[in-house]
Image (cartoon, grey):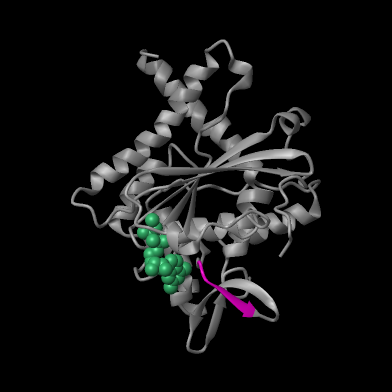
Amino acid sequence: VPDYIGFANLPNQVHRKAVKKGFEFTVVVVGESGLGKSTLIDSLFQTNLYADRNIPNAKARIKKTVEIRKQTVDIEEKGVRLRLSVVDTPGFGDALNNDKCWDNIVKFIDEQYEKYLSDESGLNRRNITDQRVHCCLYFISPTGNGLKPLDIEFMKRLDTRVNIVPVIAKSDTLTAHEIKTLKRKILDDIRTHSIDVYTFPETDSDEDEEFKRENNQLKSSVPFAVVGSNKFYDIRGKKVRGRQYPWGIVEVENLEHCDFAKLRSMLIRTHMQDLKEVTHEVLYEQYRANRLRSGDS
Ligand code: GDP
Ligand code: MG
């Protein structure tokens, strides 16, 4: 596990100007209530991100999420500034009216586009703070047999607005074989229902071998089978995040145990810039074109 995050290392990932100015990246987590969204946010963004910060009391952190909540941290690495925001949403499935919860998430995403659109036509358009949502981690239940009708409906509403990266929640509750089967079923469902999830960039022959290898490896891991935890255990003399079972400890960051480290690596290192580009060039353009067509901008 590297002791730095790595976003400053990617060649060509950010232009010189962006390096000076810093850049913004926003992730939203969505899915049924109780699937471990809040826990994963903590695991993703406090392991390394907060490595040398004061980590707030773990007990105080996870409460039932009742509203859309955005947390932002500023990180600097080798002179590159990153403003990372994570948006936690209340899960659906336990509310009287699921529609309301969906609407709020969709509305939140659209509001960020709307804000960007108005900033772009403003006087200060060279210095826009990009608050658009660049990625949506969509949590899928480990107990189901693929996507549920609610998932399909919701993903269809989201896929025109945001890069969806599907994840299998609480994968420590499944065997390796069950994970493999569920992954295949989810990919089938995504295809059958024409859900437009994030597609990894095509790599061409003259690209960096290392990037090609990593890109393909990440691509073949989708949907990422993740595990989150707020508990630490001593393993081989190191404090690691994990979940304890009678037969042993599932380590969150161990690639042999789950895809957590791959997901984090993709988000904050290898594919951050591509997620931002797709958001700007495809999804935002689409939003903008629709707005202009509707004529009331
Ligand atoms: P949310 O409603 O989706 O935000 O879910 P929470 O993060 O609040 O977690 C709900 C419950 O699931 C808590 O008791 C967590 O400790 C537990 N949990 C979270 N992540 C995992 C995981 O990866 N595996 C297992 N087995 N339990 C988890
Ligand atoms: Mg929550």
Q: Is residue 233 magenta?
A: yes
Picture coordinates of residue 52 (x, y %)? 68, 56
Picture coordinates of residue 196 (x, y %)? 46, 45
Q: Residue at x 61, y 55 (%)?
A: 54
Q: Split into 4 quadrants, where in the image is the N terminus?
A: bottom right
Q: Nearer the viewer, residue 161 or 96?
A: 96
Picture coordinates of residue 199 (x, y %)? 56, 48
Q: How many tags in the picture?
A: 0
Magenta stretch mostly in which secondary structure?
Answer: strand
Q: Residue at x 26, y 57 (%)?
A: 93
Q: Is residue 46 above or below residue 9?
A: below
Instruction: Magenta stretch: give its range.
Output: 230-234
Q: Residue furthest left?
A: 96
Q: Nearer the viewer, residue 231 or 164?
A: 231
In which of the image's four quarters is ligand 2 placed?
Answer: bottom left
Q: Is residue 90 above or below residue 146?
A: above
Q: Is residue 197 above or below residue 242?
A: above
Would residue 195 be found to the left or right of residue 213 on screen?
left
Residue 141 visible (yes or no): no
Picture coordinates of residue 277 (x, y %)? 61, 35
Q: Split into 4 quadrants, where in the image is the C terminus?
A: top left
Residue 173 visible (yes or no): yes
